[in-house]
Amino acid sequence: MQATVSKGLELFFIFVVLPISFLINYPIAIKIALVLIGFIAMLVYLKRAKLLKLMPTKGLDWPSFWKQTVGKLLIIAVVTIVYVYWIAPEKLFAVVLQKPLMWITILFVYSFFSVWPQEIVYRTFFYERYQSLFANPWLCMFINAILFSLAHIFLQSFLVQVLTFIGGLLFAYTYHKTKSTNLVTIEHAIYGNWLFTVGMGEMLAFPGV
């Protein structure tokens, strides 16, 4: 019981108190230091527990993963194309057409230096450390999505909160099914890069044209 309470408090501090604290005006260097220290500590924890697997896990159902991911991407593509065309038609595929080199650079940087760390923290570490706190796996996925959305609260954008909550549900479900950091990272990168590509980059704090 004591271990459960301790883990619950730890989760609350790392995934609720810390992100909300970023709304407070204190030195950015301290914020960056807190994030880096926390991330390194999580990597050490996962490494010691032999849970940090960089190579693809054997036995994964790649055909099923790609089928489901592409299917969801098609839905996302239709919805976002209509949304951008309606809200800001001048932004539709503007980065690809006007700054293709920047587009390619951002795809790489975002995938390796943003998506992968996020999935290490919010899926691999979160599930391996805190999944036992939730008797219902659907509740675990829901809480995970809320916390993932909360991580982006510093951007102070309702649209970002909604999109990251939806994304959090999708990524939590994928990790719950596959227990693969690689698969969920690929999925996250695909959807995130698409949003940048379609023209929603500036809305989501990506560089604009």
Image: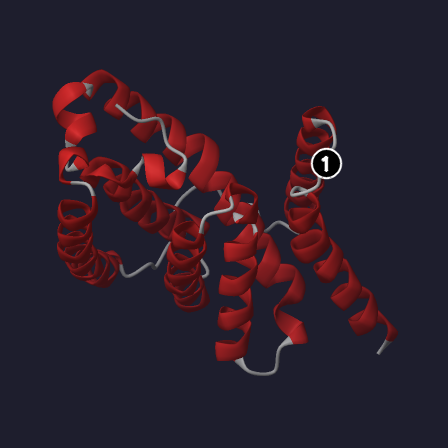
Q: Residue at x 75, y 55 (%)?
A: 13
In-image side of 38 versus 176 (left or right): right
Query: Considering depth in this image, is 35 or 179 the residue closer to the camera?
Result: 35
Q: Residue at x 50, y 71 (%)?
A: 142
Q: Residue at x 67, y 57 (%)?
A: 16
Picture coordinates of residue 25, whole percent (x, y):
71, 35
* Disc 1: CA contacts within 10 A as few (<14), some (14-19) or many (>=20): few
Q: Residue furthest bottom?
A: 135
Amino acid type assigned to the residue bearing label 1 in the image: Leu
Q: What is the quadrant of the C terminus in the image?
A: top left
Q: Residue at x 68, y 27 (%)?
A: 28
Q: Residue furthest right?
A: 2
Q: Quadrant of residue 90?
A: top left
In-image side of 29 versus 99 (left or right): right
In-image side of 99 versus 165 (left or right): left
Residue ID for mark 1: 34
Q: What is the quadrant of the N terminus in the image?
A: bottom right
Picture coordinates of residue 35, whole percent (x, y):
66, 37
Q: Secondary structure at mark 1?
A: helix
Q: Quadrant of residue 89?
A: top left
Picture coordinates of residue 8, whole percent (x, y):
75, 67
